[in-house]
Image (cartoon, helix red, strand yellow):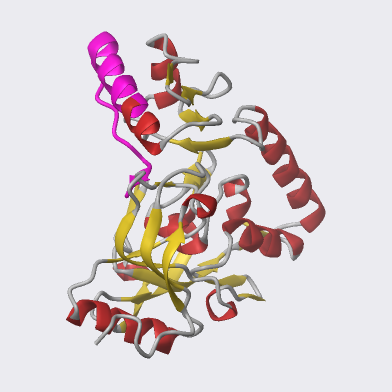
Amino acid sequence: MPLETGFEHFVRSGVPLAPLTWFHLGGPAEYIAEPTSIDEFAALVVRCRDEAVQLRLLGGGSNVLVRDEGVLGMTVRLTAPAFQDIKVEKNRVRAGGGAKLGHAISSAVRVGLSGLETLVGIPGTIGGALHGNAGSRGGDIGQWTDKATVLTRNGDVIQRNRGDLVFGYRESSLDELAILDAEFELETEDPVELTKRMQQQWIIKKASQPLAHQSAGCIFKNPRGMSAAILIEQAGLKGTRVGGAEVSDRHANFIVANEGATAQDVLKLIDQVRSRVAERLGVELETEIDIW
């Protein structure tokens, strides 16, 4: 049975992935699916399992570099309303795994719920943020997470409660196939003051990152007690180029894909930065970005 049989209304083949990522690089997906319900998603997972087809999730595309040759198997995007709903009740926010993190933050701040505002400016979806425990100097998303609903690689829907969840630096125990939704328990605060503080954090963060029109991504995790950006700068690598890929002169832990860049350029530059920092400073950098 062809993989898309029965799923024709939400599965396509040969779809370019470059426009769906922040780098705007890379080849097409063999198949791409945008299910409209949890039931459709679960059925697709079972089909892919039975057919031994690799399945992966693409969220906001801010943390993914797609290789130039593209990606085999099934790529899933949770773009339907069923996965993007955000609800606020008392001091709790429930958000779908496909909802944008920024939208969840705004929804909380608007009604005077604090905690998530320290994550302002971090791109991507709720699911991606939870999977990698997105955070900043003010804290991480894991500390506010009370529960999450996940879809396993066997197509089962399971709820993970606070006691089941473990969050570390840029990682979490939410390593199932997909995070369908999550609930956050927040603190109450004056919405006006909260909005002002969030706006200030946004301005500071954006001032230090590549310009909005640039295709860029944050590359390395911060080693314990150190800043990857400072290490890269100390190694004299700001502005280093490989083909069309360049270490950002605004923030050294970002690589900018200039016009004509390829994913291979970025990969070569990542390797060059990693080896130069290890050679000059004795620190092994670990990539934060997912390379497909």
- 87 lies left or right of 159: right
**Vertical comparison of 74 with 121: above or below:** below
- 196 lies left or right of 83: right
**Vertical comparison of 108 with 123: above or below:** below
Q: Residue extending furthest right?
A: 192
Seen from the viewer's position, the closer of residues 13 and 58 is 13
- 210 lies left or right of 67: right
Seen from the viewer's position, the closer of residues 148 and 5 is 5
Asked whether 288 falls inside the magenta stretch, the response is yes
Seen from the viewer's position, the closer of residues 95 and 40 is 40
Q: Is residue 68 visible?
A: yes
Q: Is residue 169 visible?
A: no
At x 78%, y 45%, the residue is 196
Q: Tell me which corner region of the image, top left, top right, bottom left or bottom right, holds residue 138.
A: top right
At x 52%, y 23%, the residue is 248
Specify the quadrant that holds the N terminus.
Answer: bottom left
**Vertical comparison of 103 with 86: above or below:** above
* Residue 187 x, y percent position in the rendering: 62, 61
Q: Tell me which corner region of the image, top left, top right, bottom left or bottom right, holds residue 142.
A: bottom left
* Residue 176 x, y percent position in the rendering: 29, 68
At x 46%, y 49%, the residue is 134
* Residue 165 x, y percent position in the rendering: 33, 64
Residue interval drawn in magenta: 269-292
Seen from the viewer's position, the closer of residues 104 and 55 is 55
* Residue 120 x, y percent position in the rendering: 62, 47
Asked whether 50 falls inside the magenta stretch, the response is no
